[in-house]
Image (cartoon, rainbow, N blue to C red):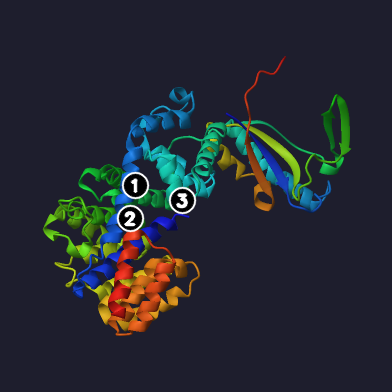
Amino acid sequence: MGDLEVAEDAVQDACATALARWRDDGIPANPRAWLIGVARHKALDRLRRESGRREKEAAAMRDLSGREAAEEWPGMPDDELGLIFLCCHPALDPSVRVPLTLRSVCGLTTAQIAAAFLVPEPTMAQRLVRAKRKIRQAGMSFRVPGPEELGTRLAAVLRVVYLVFTEGHRATCGSELVRGELCESAIRLARALARLLPDEPEVTGLLALLLLTDARRRARVDARGDLVLLEDQDRSLWDRSMIEEGEALVERALRAGRPGPYQLHAAIAACHSGAVSAAATDWREIAALYGELIRHEPTPVVEANRAVAVAMAEGPAAGLVILDAVGAHPQLARWPQLHIARAELLRRLGRHADAVDAYRTALALEPPPAERAFVARRIGELNA
Amino acid sequence: MRYMFLLYGSDGPRPEFGTEEYHQMFQAYSEATSAMAEAGVLIDCAPLQPAAASTTVRVRDGETLLTDGPAAEIKEQLGGYTLVECADLDEALKWAATMPAARDGAVEVRPVIDVEVPA
């Protein structure tokens, strides 16, 4: 279930890279329009729901803790970490842990959470109510688990902190819409976890990943409030102290010799942070890191990202071989961005008829409007 | 807060009284419940006769209906219970994991609702 967010992020990574390449080819169209359009819609939705969020958050805490909260759980409202461990408790159904944390710790609305999990809002509301009822009836406490339980409880917690961050990060696409607070609360939670578990490389890796990503926040939005892709960002706007801290953390984590998905994502982020420009980026290293990541996160989306990195490092033919294999996955075959990336590599290889076919497949999958316009334009160019 | 551990055993028949298996089971439960008693969490515990010995009572439209056997037919047999007083679910779950039934069957931990029982 949580893979959805990773998938979305990865899609953005892959597409950002692919789109940057298209621009490098001197195409006069605006290939970023679709990305910006999608992101802006999400942010606007969020902004509309924003009013009254604080109030609802406080109400959720009261609701979650029940009337006896004051006596039974002293210090509960301040103990965010205890609350997050509670929301990720193994006595709760796995499918509700992330939604519950987003609702109760981060104050997202039920509608936002439902949208993220692709379920109707009443369904999500019911799940949350059921979970809160269980917490109350079963006498579950707000507390940080002892060392013997911590390990098993940690994976769910890390996942949640990561999802909180991506929720804030993806919202950062308009000057008035910047929602750094979610990113900051995720980093705060990650720091607290890192203090608690200094020898857990995945905890260190997660903190590194969040810092390295958030370091680019100021460069991600231009004066008009539009999203700026990694390749086009003014790297002087990147927060050097956050990058240095993140790089040091990822190195320390990897030295433990127990790599995991967060450490690898952080290492990929560090490859970008360490490059003076998109062209100077070590795509070979990034492709290798995605290859390692596949072993921990064997998803076609990670493989698609690897394909794009390989295409950047070794040329479009090598990337295409991987993308074609990914396209065999039934779920990914319905993902328009995959076909667009594939079409782009085919076009670069001079296989124009195949490229048009791939663009048409993407169109048939009903991509967002701005993206549809881009694809239609590209088909027109190739048929001209 | 009180929690009821419902101890579900595996499918097979329970060991006969006097056999080595019975002795081992008795020992295992004694150890687990003694630890709970020492920790001051144990309120009550007992094994139950097999489900076949149970009678289920339902009153419908004022009429009492009795059926032979348990209320719900399930694969596992409810073989006993343990009632404990714990600070929270985490503590209860820790104790539940010490019950022998957790190893070869299952232990369902049910929070008990506090009500005034007439004297």
Measured as percent of width and height from the top left, residue B56 is found at: 83, 35
**Residue B86: % across, % down:** 56, 32
Instruction: Quote the CA–CA distance across marks 3 and 1.
Output: 25 Å
Which mark sits nearer the N-terminus, 3 or 2?
2
Check contact, mark 3 vs mark 2: CB within 8 A. Answer: no
Q: Is residue A165 visible?
A: no
Q: What label sits on residue A193 in the rendered view?
A: 1
The CA distance from mark 3 to mark 2 is 17 Å
Q: Earlier in the sequence, mark 3 or mark 1?
A: 3
The crowding category of the residue bearing disc 1, from other C-alpha atoms within 10 Å (few below 14, some 14 to 19, many at least 20), is many
Q: Is residue B61 left or right of residue A181?
A: right
Instruction: Give the residue number, with chain letter if any, for mark 2.
Output: A38
Q: Is residue A47 visible?
A: yes
SS at mark 2 in the image: helix
Q: Mark 1 — on which chain does it sit? A: A
User: As drawn, which residue projects farthest toward the left?
Assistant: A236
Contact between labelled residues 1 and 3, with CB atoms less than 8 Å apart: no
Label 3 sits on residue: A117
Q: Position of residue B47 (x, y in %)?
A: 76, 39
Residue B31 lies left or right of residue A325; in this view the side is right
